Image (spheres, rainbow, N blue to C red):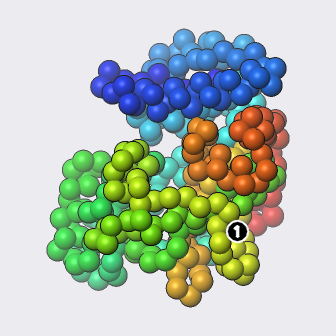
Amino acid sequence: MLYDGGADDWTPEDVHAVLGCVVATRRALEDAGHDVDQIAVDQGFTWLAQTRKADAVFNLCEGIGGISSLESKVASAVELLGIPMTGGSAWTMTICHRKPILNAVLAARGLPVPQWSIPSDDDELGDFPLPAIVKPAAEDASVGVDQDAVLMNHADLRDRVEWCRAKFGSVIVQRYIEGRELAVAFVGDDTLPLSEIDFSGMPQDHWPIVTFDAKWTPGSADFKGTVPKCPADVAQGVAESTIEVATLAWQVVEGRGYGRIDMRVDADGKPWIIEVNPNPDTSPDAGLENMARAHGWSYETLVERILEAAFVPALASSRAGALR
């Protein structure tokens, strides 16, 4: 089992967020009779030498030293070893964690992606439709997304782009889609029940979006105001079209193992792709586990199904080939 060994500036909360998932997953694997070596990944290569002895790799590594852009490098190294590995390939991770590239790939296949732009230094953005949301272009887990990320006028939009660029480097501006937020998850061949974020508890002056605080700051207004509901209470037609679009997106990025597609459904019932997430959080209290439970699986079953899917990596790729 591989996981990020952390960095010197990690807080106790950061360490707990990583190790909590590692410990729970390890316990589930050991209860199923597997022998598990728990290996922290750093920028040396000791971890890689240890990994050579494995029959399979359960990849929980979301970066190296807290740098999320290095997540795909870990997957690349394991792929070179030729060892079965849970979750997404290095290629899928690279595409999905660079939002402009992902949007371009999905749009080229005719899939619904909200209008987006990579603003240049002198881009006034005066023609960009509002409201708009500004995000770091190469982060995940809602890093860089807070209540100030959605803008209603172009002057504020330019200021937010400058702030985000200074803090995170690359930036993407995207049309904000007002509507319901749904998620579709896949584990191997299974499509899990639709989940919805219930924003009814969000303060009136807050945008109904999943911010960094909504995911990682218990007790915050955003955390309290974003309650996942699974299965989602949606009309059959909306559910079918949302799952269809999500499935096509998962195939286009050659998703394998397990993943989650975050969607917005507008007032006309049209689903829009917001994020494609390979290797979403597998913690016992995470959204994927909630969806698996609605599917009739225990946490132990979820972990075992993720491991089993590591031994059929060509499945998603063969499906994607049918779209070419």
Residue under label 1, please give it: 243
Q: Where is residue 22 in the image (x, y as percent from the top left)?
A: 58, 27
Q: Can residue 278 be seen in this view?
A: no
Q: Where is residue 119 in the image (x, y as percent from the top left)?
A: 30, 66
The residue located at (44%, 49%) in the rendering is: 215
Name the amino acid type tagged 1. Answer: Ile
Describe residue 240's horizontal placement relative to residue 61 as left or right. Answer: right
Q: Nearer the viewer, residue 38 or 218?
A: 218
Extreme-bottom residue of the structure: 268
Q: Is mark 1 on a helix, strand or loop?
A: helix
The residue located at (64%, 60%) in the rendering is: 230
Q: Where is residue 112 in the image (x, y as percent from the top left)?
A: 57, 75
Above or below, 254 against 29 in this view is below
Q: Nearer the viewer, residue 289 or 74?
A: 289
Describe residue 105's horizontal placement relative to residue 52 as left or right. Answer: left
Q: Can residue 67 be seen in this view?
A: yes
- The C terminus appears in which quarter of the rendering? bottom right
The residue located at (77%, 23%) in the rendering is: 31
Above or below, 224 against 90 in this view is below
Q: Image quadrant of residue 306? A: top right
- The N terminus appears in which quarter of the rendering? top right
Describe residue 13's horizontal placement relative to residue 237 as left or right. Answer: left
Q: Where is residue 185 in the image (x, y as percent from the top left)?
A: 67, 56
Q: Image quadrant of residue 36? A: top right
The residue located at (76%, 66%) in the rendering is: 323
Q: Image quadrant of residue 200? A: bottom left
Describe residue 258's horizontal placement relative to residue 167 as left or right. Answer: right
Above or below, 258 against 63 in this view is below
